[in-house]
Image (tube, rainbow, N blue to C red):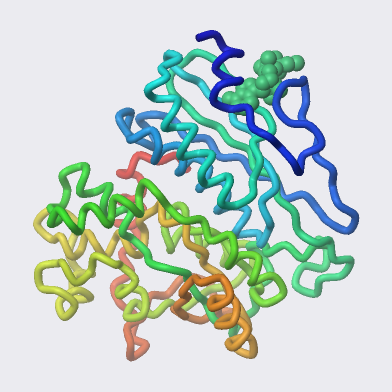
Amino acid sequence: MGEFDLIRRFFTRPTPHAVLGVGDDCALLQSAPGMQMAISTDMLVSGRHFFADTDPQALGHKCLAVNLSDLAACGARPLAFTLALALPEADEAWLAPFAQGLLALADAHGCELIGGDTTRGPLSICITVFGEVPAQSRNPRHPLVPTSALLRSGAQAGDDIYVSGTLGDAALALQALWGQVALPPEVLVQARQRLERPSPRVALGQALRGVASACADVSDGLIGDLGHILERSALGARVDTERVLPLLAARSHFPGGSVQFDQQLSHAPDAQHPAALALQCVLAGGDDYELVFCAAPAQRDAVQAAATQSGTPVTRIGTMQAAPGLHLVDGQGRTVAPQFASFDHFSASRSRPA
Ligand code: ADP
Ligand code: MG
């Protein structure tokens, strides 16, 4: 199977919304009046972002999901994407399920494959997504950027902080696959689903336009990604660990269960302290592809309406504040050991790029 056969068989689809799709030197997209394009690229490299033997269907899903998640974080509606593929060989048994996983998610979000590039090389997948948001000539949240898109900047001191869905299960699955923690088989199946088949929060992101003051997706862990909002909004935050810890779906399966869980902050996260490890996953694990966002307390009803409308649960986990830094507090507002050094160490050990 030659390069063009491969493109024709697996990656050429009808593109009813694009002016021109696969087959020419460029694809053509018509930008609608009053709209802006939101564009984002993510690259996944074998051995770095996924195991070489990952189920190709799940991989096809994931490599588009991580890109759609960036559109979600901006509140953009997906339109189209390009796919750049390096493949060690043209293996139909791999390509067919890969294309199936990829295109099923694309169809679910009305996101059309309009072009790409295909070359021989160590397996890597690079996708660029194109989405749209309404232009907005004057947005008081970011006076210099005339857009309705959600940005990392724009949060105000006193804003509530929310996170969508569940957190940490993907990172926990990764730790289990690395042999760092033992999980009961049914728990691993669930957690692995979160690692391999994340659900980008595209509908929630769009519903939050005009409601959230700032937003980011949680790709590298809550602390890191909320950290981006703090930095871009020039603020600090208090995050209530007692609201965050229950967001780990696998939490109740841990030895000692819920009661002991938050006392584990003082332990190093290793195989001897599985609950400490799980805690690291919730706070600093990656690959969740949830949204972390801020909104003024006056918007609480609107936030709930956006959650209901998009069918995505959200949890309020803290408050933005003028004092710099990210402060982890318990239910009584006491600072709990924020072992940022170990969080950093943990992210480094996950072998992910910055
Ligand atoms: P060029 O060399 O002019 O950049 P190519 O010959 O590489 O174009 O590709 C031919 C056509 O196939 C182009 O329209 C390109 O966008 C598309 N294409 C190449 N690889 C892929 C892919 N993996 N998925 C979708 N479209 C692709
Ligand atoms: Mg060309």
In the rendered image, which quarter is residue 221 located in?
Answer: bottom left
Left or right: where does residue 336 sit relative to residue 210? left
Q: Residue at x 37, y 88 (%)?
A: 333
Q: Farthest residue toward the top?
A: 2
- Left-right relation of 351 to 275: right
Q: Is residue 318 above or below residue 111?
A: below
Q: Position of residue 6 (x, y in %)?
A: 54, 17
Please provide percent x and percent y for residue 111. 64, 46
Residue 316 visible, this angle = yes
- Residue at 41% x, 32% y: name it: 97
Looking at the image, residue 34 sits to the left or right of residue 298; the answer is: right
For image coordinates 46% across by 19% down, the residue present is 87
Quick check: 119 left or right of 289?
right
Does 106 appear above or below 139?
A: above
Ligand 1's quadrant: top right
Residues 106 and 71: in front is 106
